[in-house]
Amino acid sequence: LFGASDDDEDEVRQFVIYCAIEEEVPSRFSAGITKCAASCDADVHRHCMQQAGTRHITMWKGKMSGAVANQIKFAADKHSHDRDELHTLPMRIKLQGWNNWTAGLYLKLEESATRQLKNVLSKIQGLPAKGKIDCK
């Protein structure tokens, strides 16, 4: 989340908080993506496939003013001894397969990954209540 400049603190804009994904390479996933990309022409690949290094999980999106955005903070993190709910960053996200949604083919998270992301999101202080929580 990037802070707003002093000039636009009152302007209400759309903001997104997301978790960036760093994939293991080589992996079955990266090999599958490479195989998929090789089976379609370059134009289809350019428009339909998400580029390596840009994969992410949207956690929250909503509107807020620059002044509100500048007040958002990540709460102090305490380490959990429960291995299923790691509270520290970075974290490992487990995938369960695919969500075949109308908007496209998206990676499906394991339930433990969803809990981890919700926990991280709960540590972000100052988010407007009207935003949409997407890590579900």
Image (tube, rainbow, N blue to C red):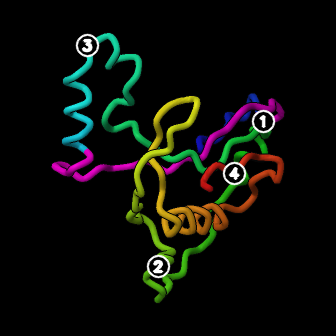
Secondary structure state at the residue bearing disc 1 = loop
Residue at image location 60% in from the left, 50% down from the top? 59
Q: Which residue in the structure is indicated by mark 4?
A: 133
User: Could you classify mark 1 by the number of other residues whose Cα lies within 10 Å: few (under 14), some (14-19), or many (20 or more)?
Assistant: some
* Label pair 1/2, CB-CB below 8 angstroms: no
Ranked by sequence position, the earlier of labels 2 and 3 is 3
Q: Which residue in the structure is indicated by mark 2?
A: 84
Kind of residue indicated by mark 1? Glu
Q: State yes or no: residue 2 in magenta.
A: no
Which quadrant would residue 33 be assigned to in this image? top left
- Of circles 1 and 2, which is in front? 2
* Label pair 2/3, CB-CB below 8 angstroms: no
- Percent x, y of residue 46: 34, 17
Secondary structure state at the residue bearing disc 4 = strand
- Percent x, y of residue 2: 59, 41
Q: Quick check: 82 above or below 127?
A: below
Distance in Å between CA atoms under marks 1 and 4? 24 Å
Distance in Å between CA atoms under marks 3 and 1? 45 Å
Secondary structure state at the residue bearing disc 3 = loop
Kind of residue indicated by mark 2? Asp
Q: Quick check: 136 above or below 86?
A: above
Q: Which residue in the structure is indicated by mark 1?
A: 9
